[in-house]
Image (spheres, rainbow, N blue to C red):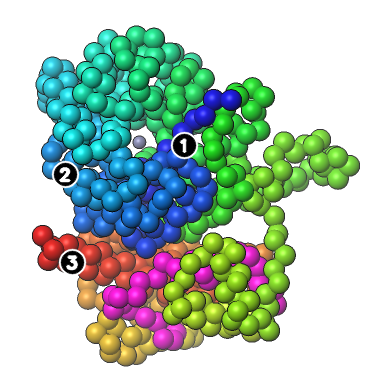
Amino acid sequence: MRKIDIFDTTLRDGEQSAGINLNTAEKIEIAKQLERLGVSIIEAGFPASSPGDFEAVNRIAKTVKNSIVTGLARCVKNDIDATWEAIKDAEQPHIHVFLATSPIHMEYKLKKSPDQVVEQAVEAVKYAKKFFPLVQWSAEDGFRSDRDFLVRIMEKVIDAGATTINVPDTVGYASPQEYGELFKFLRENVRGAEKVKFSAHCHDDLGMAVANSIAAIQNGADQVECTINGIGERAGNASLEEIGVAMHIRKDLYQIETGLNLKEIKRTSQLVSRLTGVIIQPNKAVVGKNAFAHESGIHQDGVLKHKETYEIISPELVGEGEVPLVLGKHSGRAAFRDRAEKMGFDLSEEKLNKAFQEFKKLADRKKEITEEDLMTLLTEQQVSIEDVQLFELKSVQVSYGTENIPTATASVLTPEGELKTLAATGSGSVEAIFNTLEQLVNGTVNILDFRVKSVSKGRDALGEAIVNLRYNGFTSTGRDASQDVLEATAKAYLNAINRHIIQESVRLKQTAEV
Ligand SMILES: [Zn+2]
């Protein structure tokens, strides 16, 4: 069996997609989960792009041990320097430098001749190689580039010390046949190709990202770049879970080993969905809510008689299925801690106590506490920020009747430590809450999107609210789970505002350090 490296770019290409902005604590949480999932490489961000990205990449490089951590950089000295500063403490420092090679990108975006592009790429790789043992070079828009030019530039960057060559289909234009042929061509024609790894990076604009990635694997790619739930620019990237499970289920055909711990797929998918606020479509392969639901009577009958009549993937393979929960109303702190540790959480004493209090509150109100509920509670604590003063909801009350004007009253502790109580009306309960809270934050707030969903099943399920808003020109997505959706809504709104405060404090801290 041939081993393929899984290069996860959820935290870079995925985080780049519209409406997503993760804070450092959330990025670390996702990185730790990706490490558990067994990905070979984690692309943690683009250090030169913002202080927040720099900090996150730096912290991830210091935290993750079993996966290689990389950062993206343009082919310029400053980007490479910033990436080195962020990554130098990693076990195996790795950098991902990129430069566009297609005629349209070189002429209109870079305004450079092909010769100038070759020179810049070579210089950047040589410079990066002074620091990094592992240097990946990407031919941005590689698929739409001239093949002879690709051969020429790749030979030069390999001579300059690149260890991986990435050939992205940046705009999602390729078909599996063409993309596979390109890899075969490069493998056969690039001098020095045997010394490096080739990598595939596909976008899903035509719905072919996974198929294209697999075609690349079959034609000599040693690495595929993908994201959890397929999130990413525009239509997204190739979905990691689909590639991983396809390689496993059809190993008879592909003869490929990925090194992934498939049992962690469900959990990784849910964590990414929860923290990014990007909901998974129900019919999504492998991780959708309905991926293992048999609806037709004939199918159900078949599955009951023999599972494999209609089931090619067992839900257990990807860690799906109810894990019996032994915790309830009477469980003590020790049992709770034990459970949290078994679920892979590593919380400080203070955070564990807070999570335990939340758990007790929930156990009083809810009959059955599911694994998903617990996951939500613990994740909320794990990613919460301790050292920055934020807005905190103390109470909210809504008066609603079909004949009345909805009114919301909220008490909020401000970052300055002041307790404020305010009220406002709205055309509905949610608008009344938003109007009330807007009086507390200094600035204008535009609501871009608002959603509520249930975390688990049943009428007493936890409700999760996701608020996407623009606050003083900053777009942010906030979320929170609570037993009541109106309370979750108020908390999610403040969470979105708090994200701005956290981002600002990171920026100020960085400016102070420089
Ligand atoms: Zn991309």
Residue 81's disc is: 2
Label 2 neighbour load within 10 Å: few <14, some 14-19, many 20+ = some
The CA span between labels 3 and 2 is: 20 Å
Question: Residue 389 vs residue 256: left or right?
Answer: left
Q: Position of residue 67 (x, y in %)?
A: 43, 45
* Pointer 2 residue Cβ closer than 8 Å to ligand 1: no
Helix, strand or loop for disc 1: strand
Q: Earlier in the sequence, mark 3 or mark 2?
A: 2
- The residue drawn where x is 26% and y is 64% is 503
- The amino acid on which the numbered mark 2 sits, given as a three-letter code, is Asp
Query: Looking at the rendered structure, which numbered label has been put on residue 6?
Result: 1
Question: How many angstroms separate mark 2 from mark 1 (CA)?
Answer: 26 Å
**Type of the residue with mark 1:** Ile
User: Which residues fall within the magenta stretch?
Assistant: 367-396
Q: Quadrant of the N terminus?
A: top right
Q: Is residue 450 above or below residue 218?
A: below
Horizontal and vertical percent position of residue 301: 86, 43
The residue depicted at 28 percent of the width and 51 percent of the height is: 89
Identify the residue at horizontal 18%, vertical 35% (top origin): 130
User: Is residue 467 rendered to the left or right of residue 470?
Assistant: right
Confirm whether the magenta stretch covers residue 380: yes
